[in-house]
Image: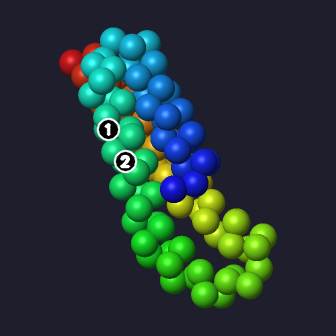
Amino acid sequence: MLLLAKLSGIAILIWFFLTAKEHGEQPVKWAVIGVMGYWITWWVVKLSVVNLLSGLVAKSATGTFLLTQIPAIVGIFAAFLIRKKLLADAAAAQKN
């Protein structure tokens, strides 16, 4: 795995943990949900999109580098959406 993917995983873990603490939720549960969502998305994109397109940019070092960063970027976006959903669920639970 690439450095960006590993650093993003750690950052998402911390981000979800701190967000859960701020909102009075279970920090470990949120952190696990966030990291699992990130890594599952990362692997799905890696195994589908990157493997499909890797032959197109095999001779270009820049193209290969950019292509291999796509799973991390999509994983970060997925984590953002997961966090948004968790925050909405937490807000709805507090209203009830």
Badge 1 crowding class, 10 Å Cα cut-off, few under 14, some 14 to 19, many 20 or more, is some
Q: Is 54 placed above or below 73 here?
A: below
Residue found farthest to the left: 96
As drawn, 7 above or below 51: above
Q: Is residue 20 visible?
A: yes
Q: Which residue is mark 2?
A: 37
**Coordinates of residue 81 in the picture (x, y in percent):** 45, 45
Q: Nearer the viewer, residue 50 or 75?
A: 50
Which residue is identified by label 1?
A: 33
For the point 61% across and 48% down, which residue is it? 4
Which sits in the foreground, 45 or 88?
45
62 to 69, vertically: above or below: below
Q: Residue at x 44, y 75 (%)?
A: 48
Q: Which mark is residue 23?
A: none
Q: Label 1 near label 2: C-beta < 8 Å?
A: yes
- Mark 2 and mark 1: Cα distance apart in space: 6 Å
Left or right: 27 as drawn, with respect to 83: left
Residue 86 position, x and y percent, is: 35, 33
Judge left or right: residue 90 versus residue 19.
left
User: Residue placed at 41% from the left, 62% from the top?
Assistant: 43
Q: Amino acid at mark 1?
A: Ile
Q: At which x and y percent is residue 69?
A: 62, 60
Q: Which one is nearer the viewer's eye here, 21 or 13? A: 13
Residue 72 percent across, percent down from the top left? 55, 54
Report how many numbered discs are placed on residues in the image.
2
- Judge whether residue 92 can be spotted in this image: no
Residue 13 occupies which quadrant of the picture?
Answer: top left
Give the residue type at disc 2. Gly
> Residue pushed farthest bottom?
56
Secondary structure of the residue carrying numbered label 1: helix
Local secondary structure at mark 2 = helix
